[in-house]
Structures are given as C-alpha cells and as structure tokens.
Image (cartoon, helix red, strand yellow):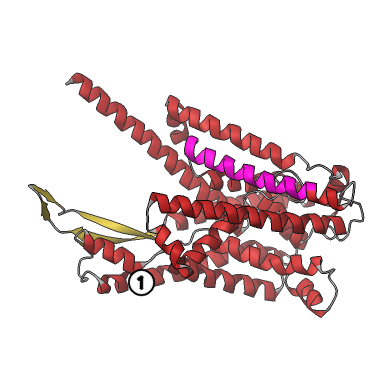
Amino acid sequence: MLTVLIRAFRVPDIRKKILFTLALIVLFRFGQILPAPGVNLVAVQECLRGSRNGLVDMLQLFSGGAMLKLSVFALGVVPYITAGIVIQLLTVVIPRLEALRKEGRQGQAKITQYTRYLTVALALLQAGTVVSLARAGQIFPTCDRRLLHDQSPLTVVVIVTTMVAGTSVIMWLGELITDRGIGNGMSILIFTQVVAAFPSYMSNIFLLSPVALAAMLLAGVFLVAAVVFMEQAQRRVPVQYAKRMVGRRMYGGTSTYLPLKVNQAGIVPVIFTSSLLFLPQLAAQFTGGTGPVAEWIARHLVSGDDPVYMTAYLLLVVAFTYFYVSITFNPVEVADTMKRFGGFVPGVRPGRPTAEYLRYTLSRLTAPGALYLGTLSLIPIVAFVMLRDPATQQSFPFGGTTVLIMVGVGLDTVKQIEAQVEQRTYAGFLKESSART
C-alpha cells in the first residue's frame, strides 16, 4: 500500500486528485464538528461524557460522533447509504426501476436522481427524529441538561433544515470525490466517519486498562489480517469463448474466468442488520421507555451481551446476506450474456444449465460468506462476555462493522489508485513509443 501511494504521488495528475480528496475530507470533518444553530454545545459534551449505552455507541459509530453533537453534518452518509440500499431492493420489485437499470448510463443517472430525492426524505425524517429526541431529553436518558438553548418550534425547524442541507452538501462532496478525486466518494466519507470515532474508543479503553488496550490492538491486527484474507477470497469460474468471424476478423478463442467472491454481499448486510436492531431501541426511547414492550426491548435488544440480541443479529445477517446476493447477482442474466458473446463454462451447456451451475456455486459460496459476516460481527461481543467486562465491550473499536468498512474501503481505494497509476504508466509508455517511431 505504501509503495502504491509513493508511486501515485510521483504522478502529478493523481497527486492532485489525492490532495483534492484530502481537502474535501477535512471540509467534511469540519462540518461534523460544527454545531448547528441553537445547540447547547457545553451540555451536549457533558452528556456525552456521562452516557454509555448501545444507542449512544451506535449513533457515535455511524456518524463519527457528529449526530450526538447535533452538528451541521450530523446525519453523515447514513441517509444516502440507506436510500441506496432501498432503491436497490426496489429495483427487483418495480419493473420501471429494473428497466432503467438496463438502459445503461442514462438509466443509471435517473436511478441516482431518485436516490438523491429519497436521501433528502430520509434525512428529513431522521433529523426530525433526532432533534425531537434531543428536545425531549431522550438521547441521553441519564443526563438532565437541556441540549437546545431554545425549545421553540422555530428552533427545531432551523436545526432540522440545517441537518438536511448538510446531508445534501455531503452528497455533493461524495460526488466531487468520485468525479474529480480518487473515486469511491461516499465510501471514503463513511470510512472517515468510522475512523474518526477511533480516538474516543481508544482513550476509553486506555482509561479502563492499558493492558486491555495492548491486547486489543494485538487482536485487532490478527482480525484485520483475517478480514483481508476473506475479502480477497474468491471462486474463479473458468469461462471459454469460442472463435467467431466478424467480417474478416477472428474474435474469441480466449480463456478467462468469472470471479465470485466469498463475501459477495460486502458490508451491506451488517449495516442493514445494525440499523434494524437500532430501530427498536430508538422507538422505545421515543415513546418514553414505558410499557411491557419497551421493557422487553430494553432488557434484550439494548445490551449486546444478551442471547436474544446475539441470536437475532446472527440470523438477520445470514438471512439478509442471502437476500442481497440474490438481488445483486442474477445468474440467468450472466449466463445469457456469456451465451450471447459465445462464452461457456467448460463441461456445462450454455443457457439454463450455466445459470443453474452459477446459482449452485454462488449458494455454496454465500453460506460461508454469511457465517463469516455474522461471526465477525459477534467476535467482540462474545470475547468481552467471556471476559465479563461490559464497559470495555461497549468501547470495543474493532467491531465487525468497523473492520469491514476500514478493510473494504481501504482495499478498494488502493486498487483504484493502483489502476490509475498503471493507466498513466501505460499511456506514457505508448506516447514514448509513438514518438520514437
């Protein structure tokens, strides 16, 4: 990775892209620490220091600490990521979206526009919920400080409008990084959010026990190495293309492969499961936390060491992994595309038999991939239940979601930078060759 970055900085064009991306990341972090108008920043900081629970930790993780500070960029990339997942799921149900997906660049631009509209709607809903909880004192149940200087409806409207506008600016920043930066704009921003919460987690663990911090860092190194290995693991299905004449030229006759990753679903099942298990906690606190249902949620779905929470988490991750893979990888479409261009899997007939073979292979890969995602997410919970240290468990920075985001985005970004470096190298080589001739 260091070698790739050194080579990238030697290329002026890529160096400008990297510096441009870093500048936007700094702007993004500035918006996350800039409080919205009307927020009592002193009270928020005092409540943050005295509150540690599952809801607070979840909000801290997915917003980089910005949501609980009620900042301008408090919602972060969560509305956009959620909107993208919802649109992707609706593509299977709504024929119009399926047709747009097959139209190429123009259809994708239309789907992106729908995603933006849904992002603004979700941002409005989430901002209204968070500000209402802050106004009612439900975000920090153990803290009685007033988080807003003024409880009037006008102040609430101003804060909600500021947060929704901040979400729109975040979408713009992500698109700028994708178009003029090094790419993967929204992924880099969510990576920034997750990494931004690391210093707070590390300091909390150090205050509890320096020995625990050293042991956790050592375990984190092995965990990251294991995640890198699993993220790179793939099944390469051989594909042979028959020779065919087009005009006077002969095409085909080559051998390649179709890469099927063990973790074909990526990080989406973990994020979706975390969001689903977060909703009952949010609903219970929004209704005041009274009643038998709220008490059951507080007893079983708030603390990560509860068997009900752990079982629900594992089952939801496995189920959604299968579901997401089934809607993102269509074996029939892949088999038809291969048949159209004269491709076939050796030993398998083109068409429907190829689709059935790909579906069977993918299902066998999805099983260990789903178990891998579920196990990775439960590792910190199980480890600290065995150590019987729930305070450290809530501060564990190497959770499944955190590691997957860091490793996945890091690997994709390095690959993209390396591809751009190689492209510039080949372009320079071809220019030199043409100049010599």
Which residue is disc 1 drawn over?
A: 359
Vertical arrangement, residue 424 with respect to residue 91, above or below: above
For this orientation, the residue located farthest to the left is 248
Does 268 sit above or below residue 13?
Answer: below
Residue 168: horizontal and vertical position, in percent? 63, 45
Residue 83 percent location from the top left of the image: 58, 57
Magenta stretch encompasses residue 161: yes
147 is within the stretch colored magenta: no
Total numbered badges shown on the rendered structure: 1
Specify whether 264 is left or right of 268.
left
Which amino acid type is marked by label 1?
A: Arg
SS for callout 1? helix
Neighbour class for label 1 at 10 Å: few (<14), some, many (≥20)?
A: some
- x%, y% of residue 422? 35, 35
Residue drawn at point x = 25 percent, y = 61 percent: 338
Q: Quadrant of the C terminus?
A: top left
Residue 112 seen from this side: yes
Q: Main secondary structure of the magenta part?
A: helix
Q: Residue at x 65, y 63 (%)?
A: 275
Question: Does 183 appear above or below 78?
Answer: above
Q: Which image quarter: residue 239?
A: bottom left
Most extreme residue toward the bottom, as rendered? 292
162 or 242: which is nearer to us?
162
The residue shown at (66%, 48%) is 76
- 144 to the left or right of 299: right
Q: Is residue 268 visible?
A: no
Judged from this view, the residue extending furthest toward the top is: 436
**In the image, what residue occupies the spot 80% across and 65% down?**
286
Give whichever of 210, 375 is nearer the camera: 375
**Residue 314: horizontal and vertical position, in percent?**
59, 71
Query: Which residues are the magenta region?
Result: 158-180
